[in-house]
Image (cartoon, rainbow, N blue to C red):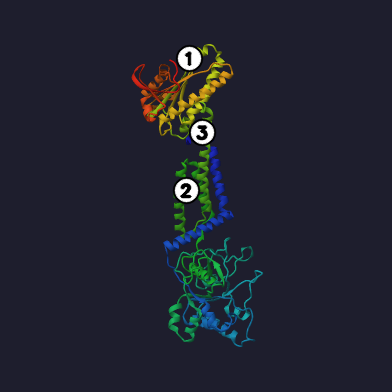
Amino acid sequence: MSDILNKKTGMGALSLGFAACVALGLLVQYSSFGARVDAILIDAQTRILRYAFPAPATRDVVIVGIDEATVNSIKEPITLWHRHLGDFLRAMAEGQAAAVGLDIVLPDRSFNDILPGYDESLMTGILAARKAMPVVLAVTIDGNGRQRPLYRKFQLLAGEEGTGLALFPRDADQIVRRFDERLAENDAAVSTLVGQLARGLGAAPTSGIIDYSVGAAFSYVPFHTVLNWVRANDTANLREKFKGKPVILGSVLPADDRLSQPVNLAAWEDNANLASGVIIQAQALRTILGRGLIKPVPSLIVLPLIVVAALWFFLELRAMVAIWVFLLWGGALFAAILWLFRHGWYVSSSGTFAATFFALAGRAGVDAGTKLKERLFLKRSFSGSVSPIVMEEILAGQLSPELGGERKYVCVLFADIRSFTTLSESMAPEKVITLLNRYFECVVAQIHKENGAVICFMGDGIMAVFGAPKSVDNPSASGFAVAKAMQREVENLNKALVAEGMEVIEIGVGLHSGEAVIGHVGSSGRHDYTAIGDVTNVASRLEGVTKEIGYSVACSRNVAEELGMPDELSPVGPQSIKGHTPIEVYGWGQRQAR
């Protein structure tokens, strides 16, 4: 088939198909659809690595959570928690934390007029913490997209490196998968909470995918518990929980600051879709402090992968094989990108998978189209030369075109118009051909109706086989049904002939069943599909016996037994046939004078 395809389409057409697969792969790679597919693949890799191949975090981050118990235990509204936040920062200094970030919105003005000394309590906490470690205060944006200001004194105490936006870029599906400080207009970089903490701890954040696959699910230390420790001078608990570790304070309230994440990292809740923002801050920070953010491989590597995937277009494969190739190649490709993902590299592979699919499916479509074209050509060319059942087997590849055959059990039918030579002598040759064609048109349709194969036309005679090339349940039953149908068709034809003033015709039909060799006989340059064997000779002779026994149909005992010896068959005893031992014969039809 490959040779035929190459001859008909040429390497130019195959190259064009290959180029189309590359182009389609690139189109998917840089489309919004491809971005969605890549996002799905990122999440799949994350889940597989997290649950099947868990890896510990190199440096963990502690979350201090503001939960419902905390809110219920503190009488002031969160806006006026200056004193408590100051105590918390002093607790971090006492507990010897490595760094601390406040992922909460601090006020943009002083509250000393309302509660004298509140600002100072927070400011002294900031100063105490800054002497011991990096401190980063979160800032956010207002409804107009502008950075919300922080109270000037808090800003001055925190210093230039002590504030950062508590923001992350979101993908099209609103899931946070990436860390990137290029959040301003024209991709200008801004300082972020995580970025400032990382820099304060000696790591240089760039941009990349947050590795949600490393580290255990987060638990948190309740904010009010930390306050109780510091006010009780419980240094032991403070150092046990925080010594040498980065700490982020943030809300873990069910309806506050929730962001979508690929996996659930909150050990205290089952919501897999939304996470407290502080969890994502902590996961991003421990990714940067550990193996680092996952970097996308350069486009110069992705392009060759698409080209290699498109090469499948040059390979001819059966449909099932193509499906297996797609699954195995896709599985191997996914395993490779999964391994790279674990080692810090992300391969955007939507275009590669798309090129593979288009190459395999496209080539399968080309092959199917070529085969269909060949089948239509064969059908147009030879549908009138062979029976439909033979044509179907040839097109399905079930009938070998090679010389030779196979042994099969069949029923052979021979039919002939009686006294046709005498009849034709009184007719013009053109009218003889017309009559034969009208007769054959009627009876051949009945043969095909029973899945029989017309083997040949011999003047006014016809030979048909039932049971080959396509098997039937009972070849003799099919052959006998056709023999009776042929008689009915001849009766109808005779009515038309009488109306036209022409002489009527009679036919004799012989049926015998047995084993025959079915296949192609002839030379390599010209051969016919036929049946060879004693069963063929006997059937032919039985057709001639119809004249002797006075019945229009003569069946051998083999056929009669396979029909169940029906009452409609009349036994006429053994009959001598030329070149063969006598055959027990059964007749059917209206008995005629001999």
Q: Can I make out residue 123 in this image?
A: no
Nearer mark to the viewer, of 2 and 3: 3
Sequence order check: which comes first, mark 1 or mark 2?
Answer: 2
Residue 98 pos. (x, y %)? 48, 76
Residue 97 pos. (x, y %)? 48, 78
Spot the residue most to the right.
144
- The amino acid type found where label 2 is placed reads Phe
Indicate whether 135 appears above or below 184: below
Residue 545 pos. (x, y %)? 40, 18
Sequence order check: which comes first, mark 2 or mark 3?
Answer: 2
Question: Gap between marks 1 and 2, in whole Å?
Answer: 66 Å
Indicate whether 177 appears above or below 230: above
- The amino acid type found where label 1 is placed reads Ser
Q: Which residue is mark 3?
A: 375
Question: Gap between marks 3 and 1, in whole Å?
Answer: 41 Å
Nearer mark to the viewer, of 3 and 1: 1
**Disc 2 on helix, strand or loop?**
helix
Q: Which residue is mark 1?
A: 419
What number is the disc on residue 457? none
In front of the other: 406 or 135:
406
Q: Which residue is mark 2?
A: 326
Contact check, label 1 and label 2, Cβ < 8 Å = no
